[in-house]
Image: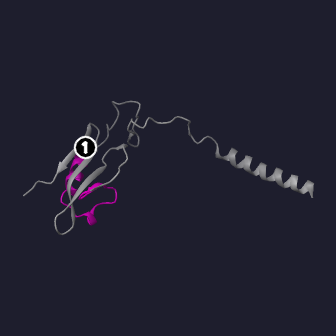
Amino acid sequence: MRRSLRTAGIAVLSTIALALAACGDDGVTDEVPDPDEPVVSEPGDDVDDPDDFGADFDTDAAREEARAVLGMPEEDLPEDVRIARRGDESFLLTEDYVLGRRTVELDDDGDGYRVTSVVVELPDGPETFELESS
């Protein structure tokens, strides 16, 4: 009985060791990011080279996509649009910076909530567009 328990224990430890060895180096480091430093990236960007940031990004298209959501009802917003405010209710947002991301504010026009302001994240900094009042 004692021998079979020892054999079972060794088998379990061997299985765990093999599983860990199969994982390999996953690139995880012990570095802790500075919470006051926003994360800025775009697939393919070299974040260590500020001159390269957003070099291939279509700023004009991002501006047009931002303008396109102005006046849009909340239920028609694309899934990738973040809502910062709905009426008097403000929402917590992450502080990372994602090129092309749109963040909107919604106000009730009597028929429901509509986009009255949108911020789009661009290589040279965020740009805000607001619905013109009539």
Question: Taking 19 as reference, is 1 left or right?
Answer: right
Question: Looking at the picture, does residue 77 appear above or below residue 14?
Answer: below
Question: Looking at the picture, does residue 76 appear above or below residue 2?
Answer: below
Residue at position x 37%, y 47% in the image: 94
Residue at position x 34%, y 56% in the image: 80
Residue at the far bottom: name it: 111
**Residue range of the region highlighted in magenta in the rendering:** 59-88
Question: Taking 83 as reference, is 131 left or right?
Answer: left
Q: Which x, y percent locates residue 112?
A: 21, 67
Q: Which x, y percent locates residue 73?
A: 22, 64
Question: Taking 83 as reference, is 47 left or right?
Answer: right
The residue indicated by pointer 1 is: 59
Q: Which x, y percent locates residue 27?
A: 56, 39
Q: Is residue 68 magenta?
A: yes
Residues packed near mark 1 inside 10 Å, few (<14), some (14 to 19) or many (20 plus): some
Residue at position x 89%, y 57% in the image: 4
Residue at the far front: name it: 88
Q: How many marks?
A: 1
- Amino acid carrying label 1: it is Thr
Q: Which x, y percent locates residue 107?
A: 20, 59
Residue at position x 9%, y 55% in the image: 133
Corner quadrant of residue 29: top right
Quarter of the image with the N terminus in it: bottom right
Corner quadrant of residue 28: top right
* Secondary structure beneath label 1: helix
Quarter of the image with the C terminus in it: bottom left
The colour style of the image is: one colour
Q: Is residue 7 magenta?
A: no
